Image (cartoon, rainbow, N blue to C red):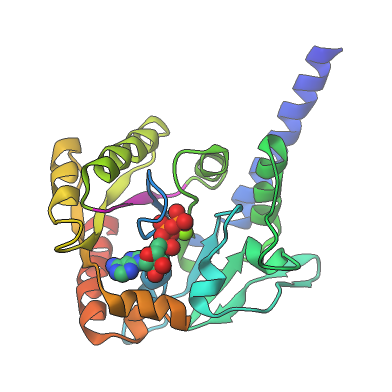
């Protein structure tokens, strides 16, 4: 009897995987932003990466979507200044358009942003799979995924069900963050997902500099570049506007990182 249930469950999972695959088949590149430690700047990188990718070709539109897969603490909407809820059309969830990209976040399903979403284990995986199945992604050049910190259940579900084409690991220059970044790289390697490279964030006098580069060299992955610890970047998050659209200097710094990803890593 139990064996039957397990078989049934497996068949059900396989069916859902196929639905997700079919629903996401018109997406050219899926890039997940990951980190071992919380608060190192994943959401900052994911939001600015998505907005920058949409501007990489001056002559033709580049279609980009951003998925906030941090189910416990979805922050993308806050950084993008999105307050509306996701709408549903013909049983499909329609992403919210902002700053030239499509945005999908669990926060847009919440009634109140200060209420925690408490989903455990299987429920959490189910919620993620349902979202992946039901969103009307359409034809996209890039889908950027903002993952929760660490190598938790929801990160694993996203990695297995969505199967990113590559991950970007964000770290701060400190030793502890660098050790954690190595964990993320190893998780991706175990799941056979290519690591596009490491970004060092909050680089400068306070946390130091060079830790991300050293980690990349130690693990044998590409160092994509660094972002300074900068009051302008922190202010942009508070102002709900991606810094690439606001601060010229940080935007230039970031453009270099994005160009490296597009030209050297993805093509
Ligand atoms: N380079 C930077 N300079 C200044 N402030 C920054 C920088 N990068 C990120 N921050 C700020 O640090 C805080 C944490 O950043 P962010 O939310 O992007 O990290 P995270 O890794 O996504 O966090 P979590 O693990 O909670 O999801 C935010 O307030 C953000 O504005
Ligand atoms: Mg975040």
Looking at the image, the residue that sits furthest to the front is 206
The answer to which image quadrant residue 8 occupies is: top right
Against 112, is 164 above or below? above
Q: What residue is at 49 percent from the left and 45 percent from the top?
A: 163
Q: What residue is at 67 percent from the left and 69 percent from the top?
A: 108
Against 71, is 252 above or below? below
Q: What residue is at 32 percent from the left and 75 percent from the top?
A: 233
Q: Is residue 203 left or right of residue 72?
A: left
Against 46, is 116 above or below? above
Residue 78's x, y, as percent? 54, 73
Looking at the image, the residue that sits furthest to the right is 1
Residue 232's x, y, as percent? 30, 80
Residue 26's x, y, as percent? 54, 61
* Extent of the magenta region: 164-172
Rendering quadrant holding ligand 1:
bottom left
Q: What residue is at 26 percent from the left and 79 percent from the top?
A: 251
Q: Residue 146: tell me if it is visible.
A: no
Residue 224's x, y, as percent? 21, 58
Quadrant where the C terminus sits is bottom left
Q: Is residue 265 left or right of residue 53?
A: left
Q: Is residue 97 left or right of residue 120?
A: left
Secondary structure mostly seen in magenta is: strand
- Queried whether the magenta region covers residue 22, the answer comes back as no
Quadrant where the N terminus sits is top right
């Amino acid at each position: 009897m139990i064996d039957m249930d397990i078989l049934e469950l497996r068949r059900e999972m396989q069916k859902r995987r196929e639905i997700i695959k079919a629903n996401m088949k018109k997406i050219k590149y899926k890039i997940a932003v990951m980190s071992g430690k919380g608060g190192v700047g994943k959401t900052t990188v994911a939001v600015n990466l998505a907005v920058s990718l949409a501007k990489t070709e001056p002559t033709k539109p580049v279609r980009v979507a951003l998925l906030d897969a941090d189910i416990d603490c979805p922050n993308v909407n806050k950084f993008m200044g999105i307050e509306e809820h996701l709408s549903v059309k013909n049983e499909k969830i329609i992403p919210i358009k902002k700053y030239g990209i499509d945005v999908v976040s669990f926060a847009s399903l919440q009634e109140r942003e200060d209420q925690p979403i408490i989903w455990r284990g299987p429920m959490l995986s189910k919620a993620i799979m349902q979202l992946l199945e039901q969103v009307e992604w359409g034809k996209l050049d890039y889908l950027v995924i903002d993952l929760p910190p660490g190598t938790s259940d929801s990160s694993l579900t996203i990695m297995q069900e969505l199967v990113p084409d590559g991950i970007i690991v964000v770290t701060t220059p400190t030793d502890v963050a660098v050790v954690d970044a190595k964990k993320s790289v190893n998780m991706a390697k175990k799941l056979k997902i290519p690591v596009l490279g490491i970004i060092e964030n909050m680089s400068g006098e306070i946390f130091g500099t060079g830790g991300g580069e050293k980690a990349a060299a130690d693990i044998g992955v590409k160092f994509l570049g660094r972002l300074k610890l900068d009051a302008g970047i922190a202010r942009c998050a508070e102002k709900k506007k991606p810094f690439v659209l606001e601060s010229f200097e940080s935007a230039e710094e970031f453009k270099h990182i994005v160009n490296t990803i597009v030209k050297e890593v993805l093509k």
